[in-house]
Amino acid sequence: MIGALLIAAGLFVPTTVQAADDTFKVGMEAGYAPYNWTQSTDANGAVPIQGSSEFANGYDVQISKKIAKALGKKVVVVKTDWDGLPPALTSGKIDAIIAGMSPTPERRETIDFSDPYYTANLTVVVKRDGKFANATKLTDFKGAKITAQLNTYHYDMIKQLPGAIKEPAMNSFPAMRVALDSGTINGYVSEVPEGITAEAANPNLKYIRFSKANGFKTSPDENVSSVGLRKNDPDKAKINAALATISESQRAKLMKQAVAEQPSTSSDGNWFMTIMKQYGPMLLRGTGMTLLISLIGTIVGFIIGLLVGIVRTMPKPKRAGRRGLLAVGQWLLSVYIEVFRGTPMIVQAAVFYYGAAQAFHLNMDRTVAALLIVSINTGAYISEIIRGGITSVDSGQFEAASALGMTHWQTMIKVILPQAVRNSLPAVTNEFIVNIKDTSVLSVISVSELFFSAETIAGQSFQFFHTYLIVSAIYLILTFTISRLFRIVEHRLDGPKDYNVMNNQMQVETPKIG
C-alpha cells in the first residue's frame, strides 16, 4: 500500500530530479504567470521541478537557463511559496531566487542581489464592470478596497492611492484574483505583465493603463526584478556578466514569448473535464503525497505516542536512582508534548527544515522532513490520547495483575494496552483525518501535496471555485473512507456482540463415569 502511494506521489517517476553539483537550483513559486508557472511537460523549453515529475516555464525560467549556461550548469526549479524563498536561499536549499523579486533595502539586509533582469511598471487590476474600471490616475481610487501580495513592495504602493482602503495583504496572486472576482476587494496592485495575464485569462478582470505622469512613483530598486543571492556569493560577477549579454530587445521578446506560451485558461464548457484533462496527473500526485505523509505520519506518531504514554504512566520505582531517572525522563517528555502541541505545524516545519540547514548544515530532503514533522507532531497528541486510555482502565485490573505476579510490562502488554488502544481508537482516527487536512501547511517547505497543487492549478487556470470544489471532494472522499475503515476495525476489535464470558467458562464437557 505504501509503495502504491509512493508511486502516486511521483517519488519513483523517472523525471524526478535530484540536486547535484552541476545543477543551478532556482527558487520560484512556479505559479505567477507570465513570470513563472507549472506545466506537465517540457514543452517550449520548460525545466524540471525538483522532487516531482512536473516542469516550470516562463520568463524567469528562460532567464535562469541563460544564467545557468554561463555557469556551466543545468537549471532545476525548486517550487516554493513566496514567503519560503528567502529562508530557502539562506539555508542553502536553493542557489538563487529568480521569481520577479525586487531588491528592496529590507531584503538587502539578509540577501544580496544581481543587476536587474527586468523592469516593469505597476498597475491596478480591477473588475471590468466594477466601479473603478474607468480609472486613469491614482486619485480615482478613493474608497476602493485595495490589497497586494504579502512581503512585496506592491503593498507599500497602496499609500500612493489617495483615499483607498488598504486591505490586509494576501499570500498569492491566485488568492487576490479570487477575492477580486468575488467582490471582497475592488482591486490589487500588480505589475503590468501579470495584469495582461489576468485580463487575457479572465474576461471579468481588467488592468488599468496608467500614463507615465499619472502612474505609480517608484524608486529604481522597486520596479525592477533581480536575482536573489546569498551574501558574498562567488558567482555574482558571472551572473551579472551573463545578464549583461541579454539586450533590452531580447528581454522584451522573452516576456512577449512567455505571455504567449503561458497555460491556456480556455474551457470547452465542461469545466470538470477541462481541469482533469489538463491537471489530473498533478492532482493525483498531490493526493498521493497527502496520503503518504498522513499515513506514515500517523503510524509512526502512534508508535511514538504509545511509547511515551507507557513511560508517562509508569509507577515510581522503589530505588531512588531509578525514581529520579524516571522523573527526569517524564519531565522531558512533558516538555516535548507541550512544545509540539503548543506551536503550529507550519512553524515547526519552517524551523525544522530551514533551521536545521542554517544551524547544522543539514540538507534534508523535503519529503523526509515532512514525514518527520508530521510524525513527531502526531506523536505528541497521540501520547496524551494513549495516556488517557491507560488511565481509563479500572485500577482494580492493575491490582489483580500484580496479585497474579505479573510485572508492570506484562500487565501493560497483556491486560491494559489492548483495552487502552481500543478505547483510544476513535481519537487516533480523528488524528489521521486531521493529518490529511493539515498536510496543506507543508507547502511552506515546498512539499507539493494536494492543496499546494490546487493553488497552482487555480492560479494558472483561473478556475478557482471549480478547482477548490474538486479538491474539497477529494479531501471528503479521503476522510470519509478513512473514517469508515477505522469503524470496521473498531467493530472487529469489539468481538461478537453475543459473546458471554460466563457461558464460555461453563462450556466444559462433563467427564463420563464408568
Image (cartoon, rainbow, N blue to C red):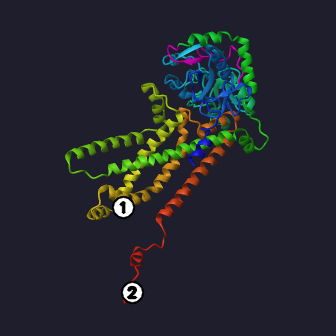
- Report the front residue among 266 and 18: 18
Q: In which quarter of the image is residue 229?
A: top right
Residue drawn at (53%, 45%), measured in percent from left and top? 294
Amino acid type for the residue under numbered disc 2? Lys
| Mark 2 burial class by Cα count in 10 Å: few <14, some 14-19, many 20+ | few
Disc 1 element: helix
Label 1 neighbour load within 10 Å: few <14, some 14-19, many 20+:
some
- Which residue of the protein is positioned furthest toward the bottom in this rendering? 514
Majority secondary structure of magenta residues: loop
At which x and y percent is residue 360?
A: 42, 26
- Percent of width and height locating residue 422: 44, 59
Q: Residue 415 carries which label?
A: 1
Q: In the rendering, at what x and y percent does residue 492 appear?
A: 50, 63
Question: Residue 44's image quarter?
Answer: top right
Q: Which of the two discs, 2 and 1, labels the residue nearer the N terminus?
A: 1
Q: Does the magenta stretch include residue 219?
A: yes
Residue 376 against residue 386 in the figure, above or below: above
Residue under label 2, please give it.
Answer: 512
On the image, which quarter does residue 181 sit in? Answer: top right
Residue occupying the point 56% across, 12% down? 236
Q: Give the range drawn in magenta.
A: 206-233
Return the x and y of residue 457 as percentages of the image width and height. Answer: 67, 36
Disc 2 + disc 1, Cβ < 8 Å: no
Q: What type is the residue that disc 1 sits on? A: Val
Which residue sits furthest right?
Answer: 268
